[in-house]
Amino acid sequence: MSSITCKCGHSFSDGQIPSPYKQFIISDQQVDGLVEQLLSILKTASDNLGDTLYYTICNTGATVYTCQKCGRLIVFNDKASEKADIEYVLSN
Ligand SMILES: [Zn+2]
């Protein structure tokens, strides 16, 4: 996914790393598995340890983008999907 288009019409790129408008939702159960994964990675430390840890965390859970124009939260449960699963609009 390289571009996100909000229902308000605003489009933005998700190519910036780290992104100021990209968040992750990780369930408690996923955190448990993530900790095990990170510990395993740390035991086999490589030259790219920071990148490996970063992408392991980023590939866990749902990805949420915040539209900079309207504040809507755009949720992708499947990181490979081009279509958002859920969108939340601010109540105020
Ligand atoms: Zn928007």
Image (cartoon, rainbow, N blue to C red):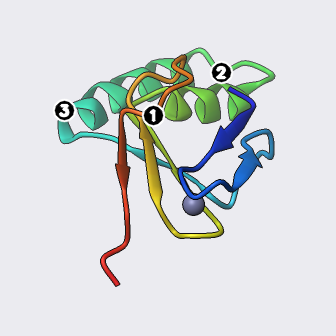
The residue lying at 59 percent from left, 14 percent from top is: 44
The residue lying at 44 percent from left, 56 percent from top is: 73
Work out whether residue 47 or residue 57 is closer to the camera in this orientation and state it. Answer: 57
Q: Tell me which amino acid carries mark 3.
A: Gln
Of helix, strand and loop, which one carries label 2? loop
Q: Residues within 10 Å of mark 1 (few under 14, many from 20)?
A: some
Q: Tell me which amino acid carries mark 1.
A: Ala
- Between discs 3 and 1, the one toward the N terminus: 3
Residue 46 falls in which quadrant of the image? top right
The residue lying at 79 percent from left, 39 percent from top is: 15
In percent of width and height, residue 83 lies at: 49, 27
In percent of width and height, residue 63 lies at: 47, 39
* Residue 84, disc: 1
Residue 2 versus residue 23 in the image, above or below: above
Measure the alpha-carbon separation of dots 3 and 1: 23 Å
Work out whether residue 50 or residue 12 is closer to the camera in this orientation and state it. Answer: 12
Of helix, strand and loop, which one carries label 3? helix
In the rendered structure, are the residues bearing label 3 and label 1 in contact, judged by CB atoms less than 8 Å apart?
A: no
Check disc 3 and report the residue beneath it. Answer: 29
Work out whether residue 84 or residue 46 is closer to the camera in this orientation and state it. Answer: 84
